[in-house]
Image: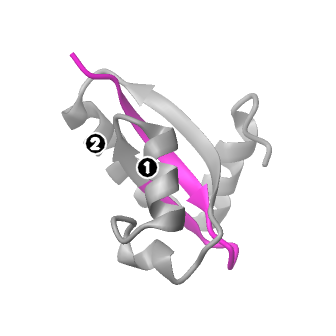
């Protein structure tokens, strides 16, 4: 059974990008350095990990990703700052 994670990246232009993965470090590297990063993030490098949380399954991770994507930018920033160790 894989561990799934929801993550938020802070883009070079100050915007936030939300995604899901089983390996946050690998995915961050793909976003920053390779063609496998999302089209949105390719033009907004460098990217830094601002937030991550674990999920029980892929479907739970996707549901939570959808919930986070519905938040305003200000609400996402509050979520990031409320999590210990995520004050980047």
Residue 7 belongs to magenta span: yes
For the residues labelled 2 and 1, the Cα–Cα distance comes to: 19 Å
Nearer-the-camera pick, 12 or 76: 12
Residue at (48, 73) in percent of width and height: 41
Quadrant where the N terminus is found in the figure: top left
Q: Give the range drawn in magenta.
A: 1-18
Lateral position of residue 15 relative to residue 55, left or right: right
Residue in the foreground of this view, choosing between 23 and 62: 23
Residue carrying label 1: 27
The numbered disc on residue 19 is none
Badge 2 marks a residue whose secondary structure is: helix
Farthest residue, direction bottom: 43
Residue bearing the label numbered 2: 63
**Residue depth check, mark 2 versus mark 1: number of the one nearer the observer:** 1
Query: Which residue is rendered at x = 20% and y = 35% of the image?
Result: 59
Q: Nearer the viewer, residue 7 or 38?
A: 38
At x 43% / y 49%, what residue is drawn? Answer: 27
Picture quadrant where residue 6 is located: top left
Asked if the stretch drawn in magenta spans residue 76, the answer is no
Query: In the rendered image of this protein, does residue 67 appear above or below residue 16?
Result: above
User: How busy is the neighbourhood of tag 2: few (under 14 within 10 Å), some, or many (20 plus)?
Assistant: some
SS category of the residue bearing label 1 = helix
Quadrant of the image occupied by residue 75: bottom right
Q: Residue at x 68, y 55 (%)?
A: 77
């Amino acid at each position: 059974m894989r561990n799934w994670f929801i993550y938020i990246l802070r883009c070079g232009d100050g915007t936030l990008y939300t995604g899901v993965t089983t390996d946050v470090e690998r995915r961050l590297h793909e976003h920053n350095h390779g063609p496998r990063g999302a089209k949105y993030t390719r033009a907004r490098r460098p990217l830094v990990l601002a937030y991550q949380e674990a999920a029980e399954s892929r479907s739970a991770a996707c549901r939570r990703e959808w919930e986070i994507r519905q938040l305003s930018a200000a609400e996402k920033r509050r979520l990031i700052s409320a999590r210990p160790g995520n004050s980047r």
